[in-house]
Image: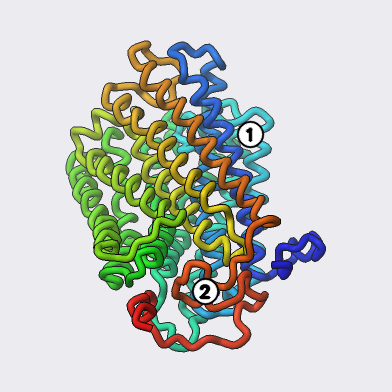
Amino acid sequence: MKDYLNATYGLKSWLLTRDHKRIALLYLASVTLFFFVGGAFAVMVRLELATPPADLMQPETYNKMFTMHGVAMVFFFLIPAIPAVLGNWLIPVMIGARDLAFPKLNLASWYIFMLGGLFTLWAMVTGGVDTGWTFYTPYSSAFSNTHVVTAALGIFIAGFASILTGLNFIVTIHRMRAPGMTWFRLPLFVWSHYATSLIMVLGTPVIAITILLVAAERAFGLGLFDPARGGDPVLFQHLFWFYSHPAVYIMVLPAMGVVSELVAAFSRKPVFGYAFVAFASLAIAVIGFLVWGHHMFVSSQSVYAAMIFSVLSFLVAVPSAVKVFNWTATLYRGSISYDTPMLYAFGFIGLFTIGGLTGLFLATLGIDVHVTDTYFIVAHFHYIMFGGTIMGYLGGLHYWWPKMTGRLYPEGWAKLGALTIFLGFNLTFFPQFVLGYLGMPRRYAAYPEEFQVLNVMSSAGATILGAGYLIPMIYFIWSLRYGRIAGPNPWGAVGLEWTTPSPPPTDNFEKTPIVTQPAYAYHLLERA
């Protein structure tokens, strides 16, 4: 434990570390900060929407609240959370490597992330941004009088951290696997991060340049997206969603990898159809680049283009469904234990399924036109991105926490936290499906009185959800000092990470391991 958690080793040793595990913990502290910053803005949004008139804040202030909530959560929590924290910590250990391929680059990515985050936080505390997290033009590039350039610069800088992390993962997975660790012996967690890394490296430059062009048009009066200057606002939407739909999978693919590990570990079975689940990750990454136009069904694109994007949007649901069906088949006749990580896995499957099914509604042209820019979109987005990603992230954090810290957390409190989060999330966002279908538009501080009951339910759910998120933070911190000693493998799981001490030494392994078994050899474990 004192190897890398003991404060007596000094701040300098942390800030100059090349150990991927320490860098992952630096990311953990950073993304947790941004999670609570984004959550604070969400509290203000839900407080405003508890009553029909805009009586808590002015509409202009409300615009800043939901914008800064989205910016903090999407760019500085949801996208980096699982890859930068769990991926950084686990990938070298899972494949039998001593570190990532480029340790200095790994540390540099955290500094770049923090630099981008500081720019964005500065924009928030000096007046905020009111454009929405999508920065739609020409409002963002010509008309908004808020700190768009500062926030855009922060997001642009943070994009490089994502690119460097993805590059590091790709090279590490290709070149640093232990002897015997063939591609089809890799844990599905590693497969999902490999697919995610491809999106990071190929897609992030597009959004970075797009946001930079918005700042350039705003600062220098260029005619890129503003029609009054000869620009095209629809071009911005094409560029933005070309990245931002694959970014959905940057958020949720790593969570799917976590769920694969949890389902196997707590049902004591190999993942059913391992190869199909592995290739489904790659299929999602590839097809995800081809469906951006389904965000633009009402943006004047041709009906023929809309039909093609509609078909492709249905197609991308197939590999996601493969994963859900294969997890379900893995559970069948398994020896299931309902420990806290498994509760989060069940929560992920439930929330992601609801989000995925409502995504099929949005791929249908007629329904999408009806619910575009309503709370139906807000609910769908949160079920996929926030419900799915958070459930995967917290499930993984609970599963590997004993390995990361050498300490156990109180299981009773952990189960209470998981159930509170699940109930609070559904009470918060499920009413928004109904609100959206009834026609309540998003991004308005005031609304008709007939929508108040559902909005009060949503705000009450947000209160429960907030309490649910505080519970793990409290007992995780408590466990660092008072938690029971975990031992190397408290779950009786298989995988190279469970063959090392808890926490592992700086170089992970005393000698390079040799892999002779498939990824989820629970059937062999039971026979032994």
Disc on res. 498: 2
The first of marks 2 and 1 along the sequence is 1
What colouring method underlies this structural image? rainbow
Task: Point out the image quarter for the N terminus.
Answer: bottom right
320 vs 508, left or right, is left
- Is residue 162 depicted above or below 386 in this figure? below
Q: What's the residue at 53%, 71% (across, down)?
A: 489
Disc on res. 352: none
- The x and y percentages for residue 45 are 51, 26
As shown in the figure, which amino acid type bears the numbered disc 2?
Trp
Q: Residues within 10 Å of mark 2 (few under 14, many from 20)?
A: many
Q: What's the residue at 22%, 54% (across, down)?
A: 315
- Is residue 88 depicted above or below 179 in this figure? above
As shown in the figure, which amino acid type bears the numbered disc 1?
Met
Query: Label 1, on which residue?
Result: 124
- The x and y percentages for residue 152 are 57, 42
Could you give the CA–CA distance between mark 2 and mark 1, rounded to whole angstroms?
A: 42 Å
Q: Specify the quadrant of the image occupied by residue 165.
A: bottom right
Q: Specify the quadrant of the image occupied by residue 84.
A: bottom right
Q: Disc 2 on helix, strand or loop?
A: helix
Q: Could one spot residue 247 in this view of the protein?
A: no
Q: What's the residue at 57%, 53% (across, down)?
A: 410
179 vs 302, left or right, is right
Q: Could one spot residue 401 in this view of the protein?
A: yes
Q: Specify the quadrant of the image occupied by residue 121.
A: top right
Task: Point out the image quarter for the C terminus.
Answer: bottom left
